[in-house]
Image (cartoon, rainbow, N blue to C red):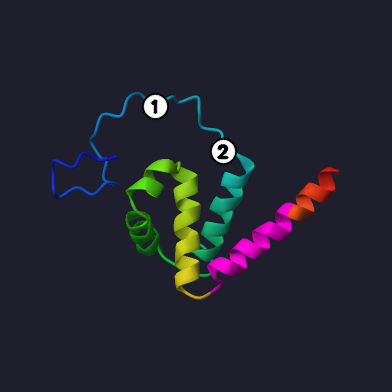
Amino acid sequence: MAETDDPRRGYHDIGGKDYGAIDPEVTEMKPWERQSTAISNALGAAGRHIYVTDESRRAREQMGEPLYSDLDYYERSTESMKMILVEKGLFTEEELETRMKEIGQRMAEARK
C-alpha cells in the first residue's frame, strides 16, 4: 500500500499519500461494523481495559501487507482485536473458528 522507496515508511503508513478523493456520502456503518466498534469500546479504554490503542496499532502493523491491504478499515480493526485477544489467551483461533461455524450453522438453519 505505502510506497517502498522510503525505508522509514511501513506498508501501513499512507499518511500524506494521494489515494484519490474520499466520497463523503459513503459514511453509513454496516450493523456488524457498529457491533465491532461497540465490542472494541467495551474491551478497550472505554470499558474493561483488556487492551489499549497501542496494542491495536501494533497488531495492524504486524498483520502483514497482503492481509492489511485486502481488508477495509473495520475489517482491520476487527482482525487486530482478534489478534490481541488470542495473544492474551482469552480464546484460541480454533475456539473462535469452532464458534463461528456453530453460529453459521444456526443461521443457515434459521433461514430454512
Mark 2 belongs to which amino acid? Met
Circle 1 packing at 10 Å, graded few (<14), some (14-19), many (20+), is few
**Residue drawn at the location 46% of the way across and 52% of the way down:** 77
- Residue 2 located left or right of residue 100: left
Q: Which residue is mark 1?
A: 22
How much space separates mark 2 and mark 1, taking CA atoms? 15 Å
For residue 108, which numbered disc appears in the image?
A: none
Circle 2 packing at 10 Å, graded few (<14), some (14-19), many (20+), is few
Q: Could you tell me residue 89's position as x and y percent?
A: 51, 76
Dot 1: what SS?
loop
The residue furthest bottom is 89
Above or below — where is 84 with respect to 35?
below
Q: Which residue is mark 2?
A: 29
Viewer-side residue, 42 vs 112: 112
Q: Is residue 106 magenta?
A: no
Tell me which secondary structure the magenta stretch mostly adopts: helix
- Residue 10 located left or right of residue 87: left
Mark 1 belongs to which amino acid? Ile
Magenta segment? 90-104
Viewer-side residue, 20 vs 7: 7
- Residue 15 located left or right of residue 56: left
Q: Quadrant of the N terminus?
A: top left
Q: Quadrant of the C terminus?
A: top right
